[in-house]
Amino acid sequence: MEPNKVDTITQKLLKGLISHNDRKARAHTRKEIIDKYNHVYGKNINVVPITCTIKIILKTPTNYHLWINVEGSKTLPQTTESRLKGFESFYEEDPALSFSLEEIGRNGFNIEIKLINDNAPNLLCNTLRSFSSIVYNVQSGLVGNGMEKLQFEVSRTLNDINDFELGKIDFQISLEPIPHFGIKYWKRLPVFDPDTKIPALAMPSPGFVEHDEFNEMIVAFVIIYWMLRGEKHAWDMLPPNVYTRSDFATSDEFFVYRRLNGCNRPYNFFKKVEGKEWDYEMRLSFSGYEIRKDVWLPDNTCCNFKLVDDQLVIVNVQYQMKPDGPVITQLADGSPEWNEFKIKYMMIEFNYNITWAHVGVHFIVEMYNMAFYRNIIRNPIKKLLYPHFDGVIFNNWLVVRPMYNGVVTLAAALTYEGQVQMLTEKFKHMTYRWKPNPLPSNIKNNTYDEADLAAWKLIGEYVDDFISHNKVEINQHWSEIVAVSKDLVDHQLNEDPKANSIETMEELRDCCVFIIYQAVFRHAWIHWKAWDDESQAILYNKDGETSLKDIIYHQNLGNAIEAGVQYPSAYVRHYPILDHEFGGPEFLQRKLWENAHKINPGISIGSLVMSPNI
């Protein structure tokens, strides 16, 4: 590749990394959170970029225009058009002027407005043509933490150089987080409340912070390496994996195997049916979620399987592109259309996985651990749960910051709003009163259910052992558990108050099992297996407005970064349970080794980490 072309592409990549990974913002946020806990206050009051919108709503004199600047804004000063109708001329119909503020000082910020004399020669600079000026200070108390939209009106008098009153100018100021900054998650999902002081035990361990920064470096290095290598498409950036290694990548047997054991398996529910040509149905739905206009993504799909000699065989896949559209049936007939559709279906599962399964499990654990962090002080249950909370809130905060322009959104066929819609809908059904629902044990090639049941059972034994040794003290501080229960019920989206309430020791036990199961097993399965399953998911916009040959990776950076993230993340571990230096509790390690013969065929026990902080 020519040197100048490499430089151009590298510049685009680095620009993309800044936009998408937002490493500076992550580092800044990390410092802000730590400083907040330590009561150390820096020069800035907010960690949320704000848009300051100024709307002129009343009168100004004739033959003048306004020059408006917001101190500290990255937006250049803006001017209004000249008024020609004297004091009876209105600015009401003029568009508002917007200024972007990345940071706001402790003294607030100033809005400077100058009245420019249009009758003065244009050769003169605006300073000399300025007839009147005012400076309005927006005090820090009005800004708050930048999480909410604020609007207020200001009225000021304009005087000439002789202090003669020219008239009054009224303007409206709006302050709000930059669009799609991720604030919707805090408002609409039962997760981290940014106004709540973070307890000491909620801070991530030094090992987490070190590995988090190291992981960012690996991802950046891998992507830059591929860029300099001169790859032309996101597809070329993928490392060798199960798809490129296997001769059965497009076979029907392999398609069924990945539905049974792939990264989306925790959410692939096989329903037994009667009176049809098939025995099991597996449905996925995106109904009601906003989808990008340039992608191919059915509103809902149904994979139909027949049980033959204890093996599931794919019969067909039925799907609708729109909720009220015709049902299209793609037969599993070995045709080129069927083989092409199997690749498309990988994209369908990938979108379900990246939006709900993987992001969702992070927020599921956070939903519960915020309730425990807020209320548990002396109750020993924190010794059981807190190691499984390490870094979760911290990592979620850092990831959601750049989420709108980040890998989760750009690699998905759902829009950002569509992802919020899906997460919100799923959390309406969230409850710890859940148990695994395996397929019949006679069905072959099903490594997931055996591993899933083994993990669920051993985590239950792990929790039972802890509670049996701490039951008296847990009861002594049961009032804190009552507070946790109330917190969960108050913040949940599930309308059933019983969904997450904790009233008995048995319910506390079940809640703990569910939390640790999500943190230890489900997240690991979804996370590590994504490296295999997402390889062909970058074809998500096939048959859309963009053809594959046009997807150069600096134009389709989201998918390229998704490929880049999957490569190093398969080798990075945050707090492995079986780590020799900072491993998990001895009893939990022992239970894993006892069940390794059941878990390892599905996922290595070495891949299980204490908390979903990656």
Image (cartoon, rainbow, N blue to C red):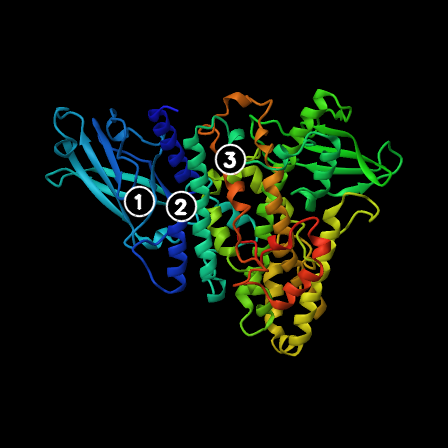
496 lies above or below 55: below
Amino acid type of the residue tagged 2 in the rendering: Arg
Most extreme residue toward the right is: 275
Amino acid type of the residue tagged 1 in the rendering: Val
Q: Which residue is at a point 85% across and 41% down the rendered structure image?
A: 310
Q: Position of residue 30 (x, y in %)?
A: 41, 54
Q: Which residue is mark 1?
A: 154
Q: Which residue is mark 2?
A: 23
131 lies above or below 135: above
Q: Which residue is mark 3?
A: 410
**Which element carries disc 3, helix, strand or loop?**
helix
Q: Nearer the viewer, mark 3 or mark 2?
A: 2
Query: Dot 1, crowdedness within 10 Å: few (<14), some or many (≥20)?
Result: few
Q: Nearer the viewer, mark 1 or mark 3?
A: 3
Which quadrant of the figure contains the N terminus?
top left
**Which element carries disc 2, helix, strand or loop?**
helix
C-alpha span from label 1 to label 3: 40 Å
Amino acid type of the residue tagged 3 in the rendering: Leu
The answer to whether one can see residue 422 in this image is no
Residue 361 is left or right of residue 129, and the answer is: right
